[in-house]
Amino acid sequence: MKSYNKLIFELSKEGRNAIAFPKSDVDRTPLEELIPADLLTKEGVELPEVSEVDVVRHYTLLSKKNYGLDMGFYPLGSCTMKYNPKINEDMSSLGRFANLHPYQSEDTVQGALALMYELDYMLSEISGMSRVSLQPAAGAHGEMTGLMVIKAYHEKRGDNKRTKIIVPDSAHGTNPASAAMVGFDIIEIKSTKNGIIDMEDLKEVLSDEVAGLMLTNPNTLGLFEKDIKEIADLIHEAGGLLYYDGANMNAIMGVSRPGDMGFDVIHYNLHKTFSTPHGGGGPGSGPVGVKEHLVKFLPVPIIEKSGEEYILDYDKPDSIGKIKSFYGHFGVMIRAYTYILAMGAEGLKHASHNAVLNANYMMSRLKKYYKLPIDKICMHEFVLGGIKDEAGEVTTLDIAKRLIDYGYHPPTVYFPLIVREAMMIEPTETESRETLDEFIEAMISIAGEAKENPVLLKEAPHNTPVRRIDEVLAARKPVLKWQKSDS
Amino acid sequence: MHRYIPNTDADARAMMDVIGIDSMDGLFEDIPDNLILKRPLKLNPGMSELEIERKMKELGAKNQSTDDLVCFLGAGAYDHYIPSIVNHLAKRSEFYTAYTPYQPEISQGTLQVIFEYQTMICGLTGMDVSNASLYDGATACAEAAIMAVDNTRRNTILVSKTVNPETRQVLKSYAHSRDINIVEIPMVDGITDSEMLKTLMDADSAAVIVQSPNFFGIIEDLTEVEKLTHGNRSLLISSVDPISLAILKKPAEYGVDIAVGDAQVLGNNLNYGGPYIGFLATTSKLMRKMPGRIVGQSLDVDGKRAFVLTLQAREQHIRRYKATSNICSNQNLNALIASIYMVTMGKKGLREVALQSTEKAYYAMHKLTAGGKYKLAFDRPFFREFALIGPKDADLLNKELLTNGILGGYNLNKEYGIENGVLLCVTEKRTKQEIDKLAALTEVI
């Protein structure tokens, strides 16, 4: 197939169009007679003029320059790139869901409200929480919402000196960024050499200024915080609350519940654990679950059941308010709901078992060839730290780029920050042993190439639509839009 | 065996042998026994597709959609026509099953789409630069406010009462947690009261937020507000509707510093409120203060044009708590949809959507007010929406309309205390016949 390198603007030709309209059946009045001329644009808008076929070819050819989950293995650590079932897409496209206006009266959207109410229950049951707000738009938005709830809880008690949030150094970047969004100061604590929270370090930073601790469990090294109960007790005794970053929830469904571990607030990533697609970077959905004592602080509206009727309840005086228009990403909720229906209780547990099994299998086989900073049973993901017995010429970036030549999406690289040359691998449960074996063989082969012919890695990828890109140039002389003179 | 999980029992046993464990429990040894859930989750048993479809259609049957009803409801979410190709192309799994384009060599599709999206958002607003998207119009406005506070080192945001109430509520929640002061600029006769703005503005005013067309559909002239705002060295943030920009004066023509809005109208389904897509565009001067992802053009090692995520030093995964925002996942798929829509409409098509929405809305306004029972709440030029005051509460009106297959307008009593006020929306999808029916019904209800 020939390569395609056009921007849509370069296809534009005056007079072409891709749309026809019915003739307006009301009289066309000159616009100036309806709207004063000084409110109208003098410039018009800049959009391309192309035919319908141009549009279809353009986006189809662009799609061919993408690597999607449907094309192959996508072991991107912390991102839970599991298969996105097709039925989810069909259900969310049903007209009776997709074509609902958010301000329709409640009696005309009872099915939608029922779905949301049930999804709240399902997510609560899975995590051991009391109630869930479906409003947050993504994981980071969920973090922000959860932290607002924590802030509101302390404010309500008149405990205004709690201005600090503890975040481990292994945390996702969004954790400290979300805490800052909510106006908290951040205390970073170190991990032990085994990758889990240093209890002594934790004890040292606890005080009556601490609003809470944000934790991912299993953490970003793929390890379960064994002392979680003790951590929870310490935080609670100090008057703080415990926040669960649900990015790694895929390891523990039906096995263990954050609510039982002592967490007060949790966000879920429906676009990770609950199989809704990532869309190339959203839309996600980041519902927030809380224990009973925090329910009154959740965003409004909350969906309640009154007799047989579902209603949107705005009457929550202690609520943090609204954090997004309307009720959240309903289209994403439908997909997650469909997924939970398909899996059922047993299926979800089976999923977590196999997610953890796949990760440990890969780790066991790869550790002979790659450095494994922490060699113990992992949860749903693990972190490697470069090739064993390699001179240090080859970087993790080189390995990642070489994997592209082998037909794979690379793992997450250079995260978590506490592991040098980190490569974080999360296979998920929807991959077969054969797929894992093929990937492992590729990794072993690359480890060999790194020693025999490192240039092969340095110059990778070789067969992609474009090769390594000058990121410094992009940042130093930003070109953020197309201009006529560019072509 | 579950259909989404390919490991067979034999696979699992062989893999456990490699790991060196006897049973699945061996994988979870780190979890203390008292934290292991000893009962099954109280959820449904797994379902087949056929069962799922049956259940979902039962739920759907309890909804009435804009396919079932004739929609005159807007107020921030709009029933515009979506061309057939939009969903065909956006449903390509190479797009929707990809992650954020961290590996640019195998993500040029997504990256180029965003680059083109940024270009077109600039083409609509006239602004210099756009980011890759934010969650929705309301959060985009809140992010713009934070951007203004950080940039001016002042701490008060003045927001017009004519800005969408959902937006103002979201702004309030965001601002509360950062101790940013929000001051509301009162409205006079359906528009921002610029006299009051003069009095409210002071040395702590970081930004002024206005919306045009405002919540009542009224087109606000920002000339005076712009003078006052910049005279005070505050930033001007304007919330705009992308379709209206095909005919109305653009943010850049007014000298706006940050243009925000919701691009749901550009080909996205109503989806009962989400996912939609927020956009944020600004001047070159403020480029490095922008929140969110940004795609830039560069070259690859062979000198070929290539696209890549750029200016990442602003972002959470690099800057952590010093980032301009915490946003990570945004609305990429919705940006794709908006792009396909904009390209399909083109310069002329988008103008036609705007013109037909305008002339049909004016036709509806004249028709509805002709009998004297309904009158305009504010006699000012508007786009697509207009506020009427009638003889009864909008909820009662809407109830009657619903029995006649019509989805009525937004009740203006709740947020604005406009008794018997209703905000009606007319897009290009509405026909003369539908409008006439609405008018006839309002005469008898």
Image: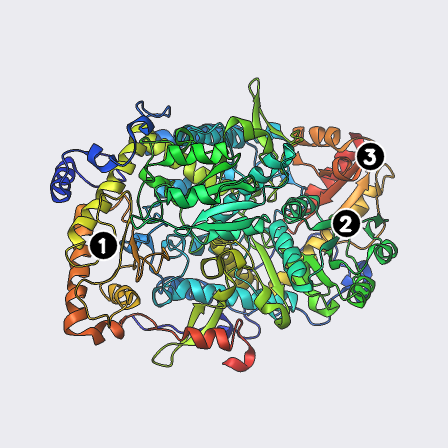
Pointer 2 or 3: first along the chain: 2
User: Can residue A138 be seen in the rendering of this structure?
Assistant: no
B95 versus A168 height, above or below: below
Amino acid tagged 2 = Val
Question: Relative to residue B141, is residue A209 drawn left or right?
Answer: left
- What amino acid type is highlighted by mark number 1? Leu
Q: Looking at the picture, do discs 1 and 2 lie on one chain? A: no
Identify the residue position indicated by label 2 in the image.
B183
**Left or right for B74, reference B266:** right
Where, by quadrant of the figure, is residue B246 drawn?
bottom right
Q: Position of residue B262 (x, y in %)?
A: 61, 53
SS type, badge 1: loop
Question: Looking at the picture, how far across and down is residue A364, in whole percent?
Answer: 17, 49
As measured in the structure, the alpha-carbon distance from the residue carrying label 1 to the one carrying label 3 is 69 Å
Front tag of 1 and 2: 1
Q: Is residue A196 above or below residue A452?
A: above
Residue A222 tag number: none
